[in-house]
Amino acid sequence: MSVAPAPATTSTPGAAASTRLSSSKPPKRPRRPNYNYIHRNLLPVEVHPLPVLIPHNPLSLVAIALSYLVQILSPPARPTYNGYFSSATSSIHVTDTEAIRKLWEMGFFGKGSLSRSEPTWLENRRKKGVTAEENTNLRRQERRQLKQERARKEQEEIDRRLAEETQVSAHMNGVLSKNILKTNAGDFNDIASVLESASDTITPEVEEDKGNGSILEFNKWKQALEANGLPTPPPTSTSSEASQAGGRPARQLQRTKTVRFSPTIEAREFDLSSPVISPIKSPGASTLEDENLEETPKQETQENQEHLTLSLEEAFFLSYGLGVLQIYCDDSDAILPPSSLLSLFRRHAYHPPRSLSVPAEPDDPFVLSYVAYHHYRSLGWVVRSGVKFSTDYLLYNRGPAFSHAEFAVVIVPSYTHPSWTESAELKKMIGNKTKKTWWWLHGINRVQAQVHKQLVLCYVDIPPPVKSEEKSKDIDIGHLLSRYKIRDINVRRWTPNRSRD
């Protein structure tokens, strides 16, 4: 057999180079937004700076006076945003699209309810490209398909081995049956005559399978021996290729390994949109549904179903610290003042929320977390939740749009006031609250070292128990917060090979 050589092709070096460049040219990436301009304001507060004072130019004083008078006579509009407190989730929800955009762009407050962090659900649905969420779904679908393909190959290997074992067992059963017949027969001549008479009725197809220990041939021998009154050996096993004898199908020994799950688990594990047919849906229904989905046109206008979720600390900082957020309760249309918000948030810091009859404690979780949040926000840090890394807060220099968090904060209550050690009961209670093991600290520090963050232990000094003036409704929030003191300790992982010098 001769193979003809392939025809020679001629091409110029320039054409080959141009083809190589055109094929290796990467796709054009979308233009990155100007985050420096979008997040130019650090807080959602409108700032109107005065003109620059020039000492040797007296006209600069006139410009400063004019701008000051203009702002006094016609003050600029102060932006206010509306939020709604939900007792079911113990959080505040902002539904206005303009307020959502302003609160995120000016200080990175809140989190999108349908997004990872930034509320971009509607923009991702309007874009024609693939979003981050869609990329994640594609990766999950590919992973499921790989698992299904691996399970299919494993099942095929099991079936192949079982078929080989069945053939071997069928052959051994045929040999064993022949040996039993020889030992139990009393007259070899009668058996030979019986076998010869039975062999005359065997079809050519059975004669071909005679050497392989066919089940039909064994059944013929069985009938012939029973007619002569000889004992019949009990059948041990049947092969997968046994044919029908006497109009009844032969019983098969199924030893295949099968795993069955509940419909709930199968619905979670199998992707209904994948090309592999799911056990939940029939093939006809799946194809019909896919065709209907392709035929239905997509709606051009889509309602924004996402809202901004604010934590209790963020909402209280925007309401009390900046005064730009008005919070409504979920069962009324009245605006809650900061004093009512403080008592409400302190009760909902526990799970389940406490009742109004229980007095507030100086070390309740909301006050401790808000003191630390207000402290770092006042220093210019962008404070975000650190539950993803087993901490209370993450500190960003400018925000999550620019860089990763540099520090991870863990709040530790500190009972250094002498009033907390007056009795043995108080000492035991404080010991149970502040008890931390070395393994806890080592685990937290190891996690932060893996994600390139520095661990900060924020010790909050708890003041003595509540006095009589703090039990009233009109509580002085500024005086209450001024009683708490904060101490920071930066914990770094010490490695001998890197810290030798």
Image: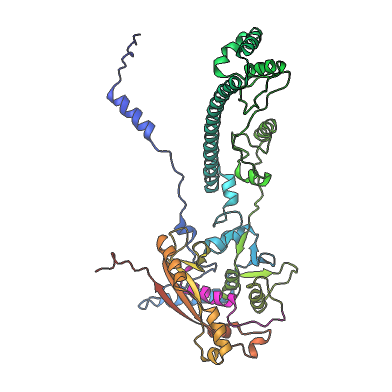
Q: Quadrant of the N terminus?
A: top left
Instruction: State left or right for residue 251 relative to residue 450.
Output: right
Report the residue that reaches farthest toward the front.
Answer: 186
Name the residue rendered at 68%, 71% in the picture.
Answer: 352
In the rendered image, residue 206, in percent from the top left (x then y), is placed at 61, 13
Residue at (68% x, 44% y) in the render? 263
Percent from the top left, x then y, of residue 331? 75, 68
Look at the image and give the residue range highlighted in magenta. 356-382
| Nearer to me, 119 or 373 | 373
Magenta stretch: residue 197 in it?
A: no
Is the residue 201 above or below the residue 77 in the image?
above
Q: Is residue 485 visible?
A: yes
Q: Residue at x 69, y 17 (%)?
A: 223
Q: Residue furthest top?
A: 200
Residue 103 sits in which quadrant? bottom right
Query: Percent x, y for residue 415?
Result: 51, 84
The answer to which image quadrant residue 200 occupies is: top right
- Which residue sits furthest left? 501
Q: Position of residue 489 (x, y in %)?
A: 41, 76
Along the viewing direction, whichever of 277 and 467 lies nearer the viewer: 277
Q: How is the image coloured?
A: rainbow
